[in-house]
Image: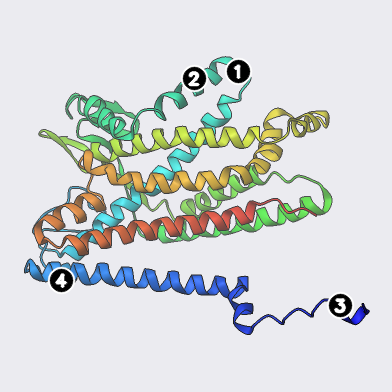
Amino acid sequence: MTLRDTAPAPLAAPSRAGSWLYDPTIRGIVYQVALALFLVLFGWWIFDNTVQNLRAANIASGFGFMSDRAGFDIAQKPIEFTPDDTHGRAFLVSLVNTLIVAALGIVGATVLGFFAGVARLSPNWLLSKVAMVYVETFRNVPLLLQLLFWYKAVLSVLPGPKQGVVLPLGSNLSNRGLIVPRPVPGDGFGAVEIAVLVAIAAVFVLARWAKSRQEATGQIFPTFRVGAAVVVGLPLVVFLLAGMPLSFEYPELKGFNFVGGFVFKPELMALLLGLVIYTGAFIAEVVRAGIMAISHGQSEAAFALGLKPGVTMRRIIIPQAMRVIIPPLTSQYLNLTKNSSLAVAVGYPDLVAVFAGSTLNITGRAVEVIFLTMGVYLAISLVTAAFMNWFNTRVALIER
């Protein structure tokens, strides 16, 4: 037997069709195209089915109703609105009410949550236990029950305006809400507003300079104290130089109610109390988890250098913990914004109560109204998430 007779036959070259069929890249493209086609066809089927059902029920479609007369009033209206205005303006008023609650709620819940989260780790036994009771109590009770508690069991049982709780600066707390003096700017107050913007810009520049200086020399600049002095001092100096162009309209009791001043209605107060306290409990746990994720050696090293506990927490622990805190904190902000739709339970005129409630009942355009309402909440959530992602990138630690 010769070597030529026993040599194995050469392998057949793979076919051209088999090569692209088993290529992971090409298969991935094919699967994505197939999924995209399926989603487009599914969306078109839903749209076409909805249009046919509306035609069968003889229901008109479109957003032309936005220019029709609303015919109802809104209790809380940060911008002018009368029953003769359109549904489009009612949509705008209710959207502003939703944004006000979301903005105030996020600020309040953040402050309360950070304080409670740090307090749970305090060596002070009483402060730590009080923070623990707050967190474990309010995060385990449904938000809807908390809203009804604040509205029905706390604010509604307050005395009337005549017997209301008198507060400093002419303010009053009663079952009509919290009434405070309303600032009335005079001529020349625009200069004070410009001074505030200039002071904020100056503090921003100062903070960047202080950070660069610390990275270059290691010296710490008192940014907080100097910044606070600039933000308060510069507008105050301009205010005095302009002749103090600001007066206050104090509320006066006439008959059975107050006239003048600025009113925080019980519905708004109950909604804010519920959202801030409920979300603040979750943020406290996020902050506590972020601080505990930092190695204890960081604190020991800071103490060994002679830094005090407050400075160690503010300048070493919290900055490192932010990269752990911010992602779940973003989720809590989104939850607070979406939970504000429970305002309908206490009668606060937010987007759901006014537009998806009164406007929908009057016009009967359920598809358009619900679609637009869902789109607004989706847009608010995407903007909030984009801002927090940008902020997370700014505060992220950069390894050298």
Sequence-earlier tag: 2 or 4:
4
The percent coordinates of residue 143 (x first, y second) are 33, 34
* Quadrant that contains the C terminus: bottom right
Mark toward the viewer: 3 or 1: 3
Residue ranking furthest to the top: 126
User: Pointer 1: what residue?
Assistant: 124
Mark toward the viewer: 2 or 3: 3
The percent coordinates of residue 217 (x first, y second) are 83, 51
Q: Kindly indicate whether the residue at mark 4 contacts the one at mark 1 (C-beta within 8 angstroms).
A: no
Q: Secondary structure at mark 1?
A: loop
Asked if 390 appears above or below 61 in the picture, the reply is above
Label 3 sits on what residue type?
A: Ala
Sequence-earlier tag: 3 or 4:
3
Label 4 sits on what residue type?
A: Gln
Q: Residues within 10 Å of mark 4 (few under 14, many from 20)?
A: few
User: Pointer 4: what residue?
Assistant: 52
User: Pointer 3: what residue?
Assistant: 7
Residue ranking furthest to the right: 2
* Quadrant that contains the N terminus: bottom right
The percent coordinates of residue 69 (x first, y second) are 10, 65
Asked if 157 appears above or below 320 in the picture, the reply is above
Label 3 vs label 1: CA separation? 85 Å
Q: Secondary structure at mark 4?
A: helix
User: Pointer 2: what residue?
Assistant: 130
Asked if 40 appears above or below 71 in the picture, the reply is below
